[in-house]
Image (spheres, rainbow, N blue to C red):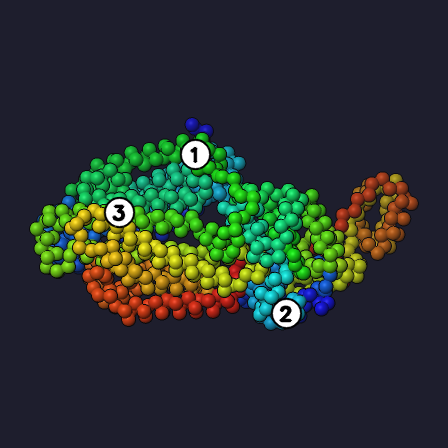
């Protein structure tokens, strides 16, 4: 059973508003699939359909080869889910809520729970109304990660986490990946997905824009480079893979195509690099690039 | 001092501007409700109407609900006397409740939401918000009082005097201000806004119930009750302004206490301590039932206690009833005519009132499941092997048990207290009281069923069930005072059920309403099973 998640021609509208029009992708066994798109693109809607929280209008949606609406219970025994905005009961403690989730999931691992609580530095005795956004998110993450599942679904899981905790989350996901679990990771942070995902599905306005392995999509990404050189920086303008070149004194700012990174660096070091900064492309850049053709 | 309240006036104007629509609805709605029934009452009182009304309202059950009148003979019972007798307490109670909700939502609730934090970062005093809100409520209630007075005078009815009209309006406005004072104090003491609203409304309810007891036993005791300072002004008869002076002093004290408490606490904190919680969940929490009980525990316990207190308060009236009736030749006449014993007729009337309140709890519980859904608190749980059917039926089961438990407690405590205060004079046993209560269980189930139907098919309409409950409560409430057409009173579900022990138990009706209610729950389930869950709505 190589296909863990299988979505074909998925449609969903809310009243007149068409949220999904022909969504289509798969997650294979042991694969981490990054699911990215700007806010409102339909990531959460797709995930809610997969979880049987809302019902699709048309199309196929299967997990483990079973229909996500009709056989949701069978499916739910083997999945874990973290929403992007974990909301909790204010009068229960984090520890109590994690225990409840694990019990209702059915395959919770007590030791992993305690380990993760330490790892994420959560105070499990505190009532949830005293938690910050990041701490609430940790409760959801610990509950999902401490449960033994075959498919993990994360919907923008790191919103509100500080970078340190984000890194811990990524390490934990990597461990899952090594033990052969399948993961669907929705995000609008490209770097997070780049680090973890084998394949990426990019959507916008309820439709697939691009999908494929990261390498296949590499050509889409361009970083913004700021460069100061000893020699005349204007010479950089004609190097292959340099776009949108702008110059101020001997400091240049341009977009660099990753395919030609080597050429660009070679040329820069010939001029004598005094300062080099590279900012990875934002998702918006990526879409701009995509629509420019 | 200055600094604490700095720029309250800016906030005050801002609030008036922000709330003006709400204020309009408040003043017009409550104002017309309080004042505009004068023509309708003129209609009722034609011919022998006034005398009939006077007699009806001598029934202690009626006194417990609407309050007493100082009038001693039917001949002196004028339109004005009757209007203030029947309307004033009830309208005052409304004014209090609305003011409580307004004050908490503008103070503690905004604090919980973090809005006050933003406001305080401007050049605004630490307590300016509370002062501005309080003055806004006072302003609204003054406008309301003037509006009520002028509407009443505009009808030009004979016995609706100018002084009486002003006093009537002022009493209602004052009731609102008393409620606001209580709410502001509770907003300081409680750790969160829900607790503040709950406790302030609880106190209001308690004051109402206590006065029901003291009105029947000894009206002088009602004068010690803040709620008494509103309707005991007796507009159009005694025109006594003195209680309002007590009310003003009381409100000023409440505000002073609130400001001192507020000044001494941290933002977002209360005076009731927050305890540290458990690191691991108890086994009893680890199921859908455990979770639902846990998150509803507070609301369930407070309502169940309310039912017991309410039953005991009404029950304590039974002992005084005999004396009350014997004090008036005419009332004695009335009861010996109908053949029913006084206790029986009182029980029949009071039970309808209590059932109306008991029905609130199951509706709250059913609506709570949608509340949880729309706040997305359940989304991670929906992704486990828990079925929707489990969530739904556990909720419905909890609601039904609470409803039946509520009847048991309310009727049991009514009966227990009644029998205790009457001693060996009692003609009714505890079982008679329980039978009178459980006789109404189909009505409680029906409200539960309506809420369940809404949960399944149109969850946003869940609140409408409260409106229907309030409506049928009013129909029953006023049905005891005014004769309503049969079809009209039958729009309230309780009216279908005969009132034990006065009337005979009706098996067919009992079974029919029960079956209809259960069908509503099943139909609701069909919807709940297939609809999209709504998150973040
Ligand atoms: N229950 C709903 N009712 C109406 N519109 C909705 C609902 N849920 C989502 N939408 C709309 O569908 C679109 C996709 O939303 P969502 O899937 O949450 O986006 P994303 O998770 O990618 O940010 C948005 O425009 C959103 O406003
Ligand atoms: Mg989303």
Going 15% across and 59% down the picture, which residue do you hit? Answer: B340
**Some atom of ligand 2 lies within 8 Å of the CB belonging to the residue at label 1:** no
Q: Secondary structure at mark 2?
A: strand
Which is more toward the observer, A99 or A44? Answer: A99
Looking at the figure, which quarter contains the N terminus of chain A? bottom right
Which is more toward the observer, B137 or A94? Answer: A94
Q: Name the quadrant containing residue B37.
A: bottom left
Q: Which residue is mark 1?
A: B262
Q: Are dots 3 and 2 in contact, CB under 8 Å?
A: no
Earlier sequence position, callout 1 versus callout 3: 1
Q: Position of residue B137 (x, y in %)?
A: 36, 42
Q: Secondary structure at mark 3?
A: helix
In this image, B177 relative to A220: left or right? left
Chain ID at mark 1: B
Could you say which disc has been placed on residue B483 in the image? none
In the image, are marks 3 and 2 on the same chain? Answer: no
Looking at the figure, which quarter contains the C terminus of chain A? bottom right
Q: Position of residue B20 (x, y in %)?
A: 40, 48
Going 45% across and 31% down the picture, which residue do you hit? Answer: B264
Mark 3 residue crowding within 10 angstroms, few (<14) / some (14–19) / many (20+): many
Chain ID at mark 2: A
Can you see residue A238? no
Q: Which residue is mark 3?
A: B313
**Farthest residue, direction front:** B424
Could you say which disc has been placed on residue A66 in the image? 2
């Amino acid at each position: 059973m190589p296909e863990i998640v299988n979505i074909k021609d998925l449609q969903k509208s809310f009243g007149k508003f068409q949220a999904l029009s022909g969504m289509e992708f798969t997650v294979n066994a042991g694969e981490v699939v990054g699911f990215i798109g700007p806010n409102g693109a339909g990531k959460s809607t797709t995930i809610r359909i997969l979880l049987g929280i809302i019902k699709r209008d048309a199309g196929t949606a299967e997990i483990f080869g079973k229909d996500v609406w009709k056989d949701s219970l069978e499916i739910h025994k083997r999945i874990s889910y973290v929403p992007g905005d974990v909301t909790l009961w204010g009068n229960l403690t984090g520890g109590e809520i994690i225990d409840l989730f694990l019990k209702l999931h059915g395959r919770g691992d007590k030791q992993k729970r305690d380990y993760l609580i330490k790892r994420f530095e959560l105070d499990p005795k505190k009532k949830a109304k005293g938690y910050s956004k990041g701490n609430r998110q940790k409760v959801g993450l610990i509950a999902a990660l401490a449960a033994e599942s075959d498919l993990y679904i994360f919907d923008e899981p790191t919103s509100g986490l500080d970078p340190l905790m984000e890194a811990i989350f990524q390490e934990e996901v990597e461990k899952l990946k090594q033990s052969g679990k399948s993961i669907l990771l929705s995000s609008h942070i490209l770097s997070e997905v780049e680090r973890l995902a084998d394949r990426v599905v990019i959507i916008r306005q309820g439709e697939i824009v691009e999908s494929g392995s990261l390498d296949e999509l590499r050509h889409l990404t361009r970083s913004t480079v700021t460069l100061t050189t000893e020699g005349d920086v204007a010479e950089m303008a004609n190097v292959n893979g340099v776009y949108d070149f702008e110059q101020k004194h001997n400091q240049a700012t341009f977009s660099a195509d990753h395919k030609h990174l080597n050429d660009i660096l070679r040329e820069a070091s010939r001029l004598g690099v005094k300062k080099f900064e590279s900012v990875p492309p934002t998702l918006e850049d990526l879409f701009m690039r995509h629509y420019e053709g | 001092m200055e600094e604490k309240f700095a720029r309250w006036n800016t906030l005050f104007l801002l609030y008036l501007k922000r709330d003006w629509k709400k204020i309009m609805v408040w003043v017009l709605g409550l104002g017309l409700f309080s004042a505009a029934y004068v023509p309708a009452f003129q209609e009722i009182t034609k011919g022998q109407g006034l005398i009939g009304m006077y007699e009806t309202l001598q029934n202690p059950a009626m006194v417990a609900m609407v309050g007493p009148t100082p009038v001693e003979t039917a001949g002196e019972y004028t339109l004005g006397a009757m209007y203030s007798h029947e309307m004033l307490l009830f309208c005052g109670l409304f004014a209090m409740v609305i003011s409580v909700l307004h004050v908490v939502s503008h103070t503690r609730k905004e604090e919980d939401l973090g809005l006050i934090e933003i406001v305080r970062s401007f050049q605004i005093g630490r307590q300016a918000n509370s002062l501005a809100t309080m003055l806004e409520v006072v302003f609204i209630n003054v406008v309301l009082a003037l509006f009520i007075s002028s509407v009443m005078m505009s009808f030009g009815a004979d016995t609706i005097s100018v002084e009486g009209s002003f006093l009537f309006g002022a009493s209602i406005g004052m009731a609102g201000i008393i409620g606001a004072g209580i709410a502001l104090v509770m907003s300081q003491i409680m750790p969160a806004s829900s607790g503040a609203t709950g406790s302030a409304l609880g106190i209001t309810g308690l004051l109402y119930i206590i006065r029901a007891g003291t009105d029947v036993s000894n009206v002088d005791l009602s004068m010690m009750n803040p709620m008494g300072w509103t309707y005991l002004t007796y507009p159009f008869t005694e025109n006594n302004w003195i209680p309002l002076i007590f009310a003003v002093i009381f409100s000023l004290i409440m505000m002073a206490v609130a400001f001192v408490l507020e000044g001494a606490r941290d933002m977002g904190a209360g005076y009731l301590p927050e305890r540290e919680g458990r690191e691991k969940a108890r086994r009893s929490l680890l199921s859908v039932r455990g979770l639902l009980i846990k998150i509803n525990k507070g609301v369930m316990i407070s309502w169940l206690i309310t039912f017991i207190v309410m039953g005991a308060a009404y029950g304590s009236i039974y002992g005084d009833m005999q004396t009350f009736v014997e004090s008036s030749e005419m009332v004695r006449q009335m009861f010996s005519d109908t053949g029913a014993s006084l206790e029986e007729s009182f029980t029949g009337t009071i039970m309808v009132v209590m059932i109306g309140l008991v029905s609130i709890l199951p509706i709250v519980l059913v609506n709570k499941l949608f509340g949880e859904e729309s706040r997305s608190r359940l989304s991670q749980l929906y992704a486990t092997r828990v079925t929707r059917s489990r969530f739904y039926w556990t909720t419905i089961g909890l609601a039904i048990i609470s409803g039946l438990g509520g009847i048991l407690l309310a009727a049991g405590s009514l009966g227990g207290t009644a029998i205790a205060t009457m001693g060996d004079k009692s003609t009714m046993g505890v079982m008679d009281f329980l039978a009178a209560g459980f006789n109404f269980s189909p009505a409680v189930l029906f409200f539960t069923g309506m809420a369940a139907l809404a949960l399944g098919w149109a969850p946003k309409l869940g609140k409408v069930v409260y409106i229907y409950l309030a409506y049928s409560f009013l129909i029953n409430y006023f049905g005891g005072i005014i004769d309503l057409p049969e079809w009209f009173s039958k729009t309230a579900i309780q009216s279908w059920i005969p009132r034990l022990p006065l009337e005979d138990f009706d098996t067919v009706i009992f079974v029919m309403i029960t079956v209809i209610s259960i069908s509503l729950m099943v139909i609701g389930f069909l919807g709940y099973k297939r609809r999209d869950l709504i998150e973040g709505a």
